[in-house]
Amino acid sequence: MSSINQSRVSEFLLLGLSRQPQQQQQLLFLIFLIIYLATLLGNLLIILAISTDSHLHTPMYFFLSNLSFVYVCFSSTTVPKVLAIHMLRNQAISFSGCLTQMYFVSLFAEMDNFLLAVMAYDQYVAICHPLHYTIKMTHQLCAIFVMGSWLVANLYALLHTLLVAQLSFCGDNIIPHFFCDLTPLLKLSCSDTHLNELMTLTVGTVITVTPFVCILISYFHITCAALRVSSSRGGWKSFSTCSSHLAVVCLFYGTIISLYFNPSSSHSSGRDMAAAMMFTVVTPMLNPFIYSLRNRNMKGALRKLLTMNLYLLISVRKSHT
């Protein structure tokens, strides 16, 4: 093999959305900017509302505030680079920058995964064991759940990042994606990627499927408890409290399974991009709407927060006049 082919790639080109016509690119830039701002505003409002309202200092809202924080970070890992590519017309990302982005995408994806499972368990305890809820869901246990999730997610993300760092990239450096993701990077490598694919299908499956199974078991017990309630209205009320969480679970796992748990030969760049956009861009934006529209406590806390800020703004203006 020639010395040129053996030379290590120092940067990649993220083509993602730049292959679209110019007018469509401008529209996509505007859409991504609006989605990103809505994601930041909505999720930060949820975090502020939960932190300032003492009525929401419960395990359920503690996990929700952590999920909102993860979504802010998740979106900030990918969308700013997309916006920068469109603004600066520079599609290049360094090799180290690409690995860093891949690490954080993997980290926040797994945190999303673990937090959804923990929230399902919280719903299970609240509905199936309401009398023991405060005994079982202690502050210490909630902190252990969150810290344990961060630890495992970090280790998993680090595993994939270190394995990819060992690969050689000696030919094409064009990534047909809008961020550095594992699947397109493996396609570009001129090394043997069987170990990487094996880790995805073994460790990745265990890390992803275990929380999913926990969610299914939790909702199986919740459904049984709802059916046992004598009043059909009471049973529906018990189950409807979980509808917001179920919506996020379906969005997340639907895209994850289609994106990462198919053979690499069955992947197309267009389908992969659409699926990745769902769980890295769209789901973080929808999170505030899903959890606030059907939740009276969240709507009340957000209303109180906005009213308080509006009152402070009026007071400041009056003091300056």
Image (cartoon, grey):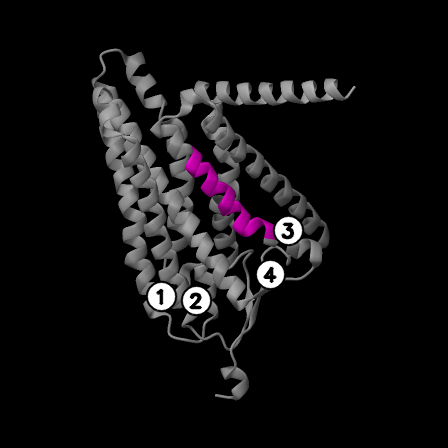
Residue placed under numbered mark 2 in the picture: 186
Query: Given this view, does label 1 or label 4 mark the residue nearer the observer?
Result: 1
Magenta region, residue range: 65-80
Looking at the image, the residue that sits furthest to the front is: 319
Residue placed under numbered mark 3 in the picture: 83
- 91 shown above or below 191: above
Q: Are marks 2 and 1 in contact (CB under 8 Å)?
A: yes
Q: Which quadrant of the figure contains the C terminus? A: top right
Mark 4 / mark 3, whichever is N-terminal: 4
Q: Which mark is residue 9?
A: none
Residue 37 image-quadrant placement: top right
Mark 1 / mark 3, whichever is N-terminal: 3
**What amino acid is at disc 1?**
Asn
What residue is at 39 percent from the left and 54 percent from the top? 260
Disc 1 is placed on an element classified as helix
Viewed as shown, does residue 109 lie left or right of 311?
left
- Give the Cα distance between marks 1 and 3: 30 Å
- Give the Cα distance between marks 2 and 1: 8 Å
Mark 1 / mark 4, whichever is N-terminal: 4
Looking at the image, the residue that sits furthest to the right is: 321
Q: Are marks 1 and 3 in contact (CB under 8 Å)?
A: no
Disc 2 is placed on an element classified as helix
Residue placed under numbered mark 1 in the picture: 196
**Crowd class of label 3 (few under 14; some 14 to 19; many from 20; radius 10 Å):** some
Disc 3 is placed on an element classified as helix
- Give the Cα distance between marks 4 and 3: 13 Å
Looking at the image, the residue that sits furthest to the bottom is: 2
**What amino acid is at disc 2?**
Leu
- Give the Cα distance between marks 2 and 4: 16 Å
- 224 shown above or below 192: above
